[in-house]
Image: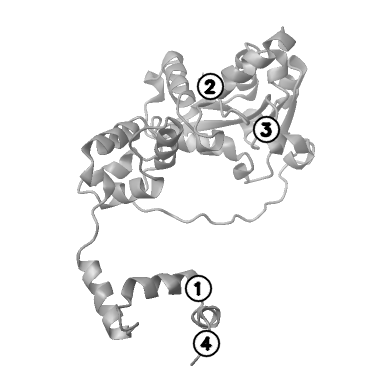
Amino acid sequence: MGLSMTDIAKKLSRHRSSLYRELNRNSDQEGYFPKAAQQKAEDRAKYKRQCKLHLNGYLRDYVVRALQKGWSPEQIAGRMKRKNLTIYACHETIYQFIYQSKNKEYYYYLPYKKRKRQKRYNRKKQSCRYGAIRLIDQRPADVDERKRFGHWEGDTIHFKGHREKVVTTLVERKSRMVFLIKNNSKHSEGVMDKIKEKLTTLPSKMCKTITFDQGVEFADYRRLERQMDCRVYYCETHSPWQKGSNENMNGRLRWYLPKDAEIDKITQEELDQLSAKMNRCPRKCLGYKTPQEVFIQQYKNDCRIWG
């Protein structure tokens, strides 16, 4: 028909690079013929290329050990690249290895233990639940930019059969540093007091704002503001996703603290060990540095000012 590759791509709703790849793969010396191209594609499908991790035992062992530590495929791939290791596999290759492997339990090592990868869906904005509190849209704009330390997000993890006993999670927005606090009661006064005790161990400038959801355990925000030089903000009703750093961390923690865990047998010392483990885990958002590395680096840079 004399059409250009750009015109053909528009008619087929494909990128023209896809057409060039098709021609390069399935053309012969005499040109491109559809029946011959289809036969070549079917022949290639019969002999799938083996995954890199199946061929390289050392790489496979490295990936499996990292998965057992609770690292995600993106964290594993990013950490290998950051350390300039002689072995490497991208996160997509690791996902394919997990879901195509004969060992069907590998997906259980993923932070969310999903049998299949799921798409993310947009959530509708909800109306405000309380009018008297300070909502997240009143929070300073520089908090969203994550350029400064001292802005925290807080939430609680609940367990089946234990309505009162919860674990408070505190995440610093820039470094993703996490602290875990065990609470024997959801009473707001006690929850806020323990948050104050934990954060007062840090320099005062390391706690400028805290963002909670509208749970009853965080209702007594004035008590926290009186005891500390910080401001408390709340997500909108039924919108915990607005404090995404904390929700993401809660999902990772569920690998170690499932809903059916016996919270009575978990001590504060064990929670401190778990938070230390999470703070030593490389994060993609930090350039595959660990929260502990980012936190310590900032602390060394600013300790003279804080002192």
Near mark 4 (Cα within 10 A), the count class, few <14, some 14-19 or many ≥20, is few
Q: Is residue 73 above or below residue 1?
A: above
Where is residue 60 shown, x and y percent of the image? 26, 38
Res. 100 mark: none
Marks 2, 3: nearer the viewer: 2
Which badge, 2 or 1, is on the more N-terminal residue?
A: 1
Q: Residue at x 49, y 80 (%)?
A: 12
Q: Residues within 10 Å of mark 2 (few under 14, many from 20)?
A: some
Q: Are the residues at dot 4 and dot 3 in contact (C-beta closer than 8 Å)?
A: no
Please tell me whether residue 62 is drawn above or below residue 208 in the rendered image. below
Cα distance between the residues tagged 2 and 1: 44 Å
Q: Quadrant of residue 156?
A: top right
Residue holding disc 2: 293
- Asked whether disc 2 touches disc 3, contact meaning CB atoms under 8 Å apart, the reply is no
* Residue 196, image x, y percentages: 65, 16
Q: Is residue 291 left or right of residue 234?
A: left
Query: What is the C-alpha distance between the residues marked 4 and 3?
Result: 58 Å
Question: N-terminal of the two: label 2 or label 3?
Answer: 3
- The dot on residue 3 is 4
**Residue for point 62% across, 35% down:** 215
Q: Quadrant location of residue 221?
A: top right
Frontmost residue, 121 versus 282: 282
Q: Which residue is mark 3?
A: 211
Cα separation, mark 2 vs mark 4, equals 57 Å
Element at badge 1?
Answer: helix
User: Mark 1 highlights which residue?
Assistant: 16
In-image side of 40 versus 200 (left or right): left
Kind of residue at badge 2: Glu
Q: Amino acid at mark 4?
A: Leu
